[in-house]
Image (cartoon, helix red, strand yellow):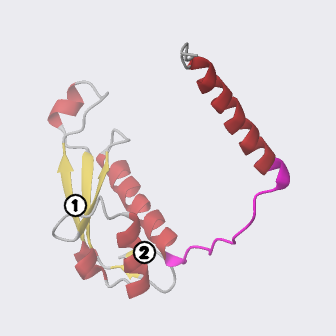
């Protein structure tokens, strides 16, 4: 069980770990020991509340495969155990982000100074493009 909050824990059935060879430093050990971790989080077995799952799917839709699994690859550390912890922490952090709905954006008007700066920049760009034009020699 992986505790996300006092109201929700990730069931172990929703997690699948696979250990793979990592690239990078580590010398001979890199070629012999599978230290990188692929952690698959199955959304169907997760038991996430519907609103959390909707926010999670909206944020991570590119990383969720056809089977409904979110894949995390942790290879930051040289030890397998540290990579396991890293992958699980990343999952918990991502789920905590989905717990709270995003704040509504308050509609604001641009200030007079910002409006003036924008118009000045447009005028300068227009002048620059006018200077590039060939003049019409037909009178």
Residue 52 percent coordinates (x, y) = 43, 80
SS class, disc 1: strand
In the rendered image, which quarter is residue 135 located in?
top right
Magenta residue check for 1: no
- Magenta-colored span: 99-114
Lower position in the chain sequence, tag 1 or tag 2: 1
In the rendered image, which quarter is residue 34 located in?
top left
Residue 123 percent coordinates (x, y) = 71, 35
Residue under label 1: 17
Residue 138 percent coordinates (x, y) = 54, 15
Q: Kindly tell me whether residue 49 is visible in this rendering.
A: no
Magenta residue check for 108: yes
Residue under label 2: 55
Q: Does residue 135 lie above or below 4 as drawn?
A: above
The one of 135 and 26 positioned closer to us in this rendering: 135
Q: Main secondary structure of the magenta part?
A: loop
Residue depicted at 62% across the width and 74% down the height: 103
Q: Does residue 104 lie above or below 93 as drawn?
A: below
The image's mark for residue 29 is: none
The one of 67 and 23 positioned closer to us in this rendering: 67
């Amino acid at each position: 069980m992986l505790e996300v909050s006092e109201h929700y824990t990730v069931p172990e059935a929703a997690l699948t770990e696979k250990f793979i060879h990592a690239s990078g430093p580590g010398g001979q050990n890199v070629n012999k020991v599978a230290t990188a971790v692929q952690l698959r989080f199955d959304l169907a077995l997760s038991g996430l509340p519907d609103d959390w799952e909707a926010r999670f799917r909206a944020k991570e839709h590119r990383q969720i495969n056809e089977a409904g699994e979110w894949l995390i690859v942790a290879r930051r550390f040289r030890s397998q155990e540290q990579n396991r912890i890293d992958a699980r922490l990343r999952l918990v952090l991502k789920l905590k982000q989905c717990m709270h709905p995003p704040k509504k954006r308050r509609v604001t008007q641009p200030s007079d100074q910002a409006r003036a700066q924008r118009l000045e920049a447009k005028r300068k760009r227009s002048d620059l493009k006018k200077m590039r034009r060939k003049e019409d020699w037909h009178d």
